[in-house]
Image (tube, rainbow, N blue to C red):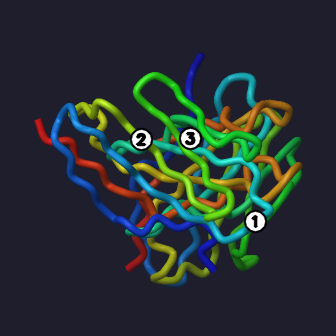
Amino acid sequence: ETGVTQSPTHLIKTRGQQVTLRCSSQSGHNTVSWYQQALGQGPQFIFQYYREEENGRGNFPPRFSGLQFPNYSSELNVNALELDDSALYLCASSLATGEMNEQFFGPGTRLTVL
Amino acid sequence: DQQVKQNSPSLSVQEGRISILNCDYTNSMFDYFLWYKKYPAEGPTFLISISSIKDKNEDGRFTVFLNKSAKHLSLHIVPSQPGDSAVYFCAAPPGMNTGNQFYFGTGTSLTVIP
């Protein structure tokens, strides 16, 4: 059983650019959530995907968008990058019918916007 | 608006002694709480949880206490071990049927001194 993996591990972009982050969910999991963790802060919920549909969204602007694929892997896309988008982006997978404590996080992608 | 707060950014404890990490929340509708542990370069991992129908949950060296009237929970680690050195986050889902949309606190960095 493989855990949650994310790619790339680190990324440097400049303001105004676009970025795509990728997440492979744990085997058997059908729900993926994305979180943004700024320096010195806790993870902030961005959105969640279930069966390829967005299923809940936090307080993030529309330039944060996502996709979930039939194999339950997911992408987070951020357009028009801003300096404040610099953060660790965490992906978490779970079963929609599972217990709340059975959400497993990947190691994250560290995004730096210059 | 920070609905889950951890007011101590860091804590240092001698090996073998008790570590007490605190968390406060503002939303009285929260009915389930989780603690996550995060090592550098890894994603958060689930540690222990508690439902609002209980005031205590114990798992080995880890005990979580919930005081609903004070909207306060605490994580006790006893005895503390050097391997417990990590950042600890408390988290709460906003309500029933919200999937894995958690509110996280800002974290407390625990250092256990050998």
Q: Amino acid at mark 3?
A: Phe
Q: Nearer the viewer, residue B8 or A84?
A: B8
Q: Nearer the viewer, residue A102 or A83?
A: A102
Q: Is residue B114 left or right of residue A50?
A: left
Residue pictured at 72% horizontal, 47% vertical: B32
Mark identifier at residue B28? 1
Protein chain holding label 2: B
Quarter-wise, where is residue A79 in the image? bottom right
* Image coords of residue A92 (percent x, y): 63, 43
**Alpha carbon of mark 1 to alpha carbon of mark 2: how far?**
23 Å
**Placement of A82 over or under B41, stated as above or below:** below
Q: Is the Cβ of the residue at disc 3 closer than 8 Å to that at disc 1? A: no
Residue of label 3: A105
Quarter placement of the C terminus of chain A: bottom left
Q: Amino acid at mark 1?
A: Ser
Q: Secondary structure at mark 1?
A: loop
* Image coords of residue A94 (percent x, y): 72, 35
Residue of label 2: B76
Disc nearest the viewer among 3 and 1: 1
Q: Is the Cβ of the residue at disc 1 closer than 8 Å to that at disc 2? A: no
**Alpha carbon of mark 3 to alpha carbon of mark 2: how far?**
23 Å
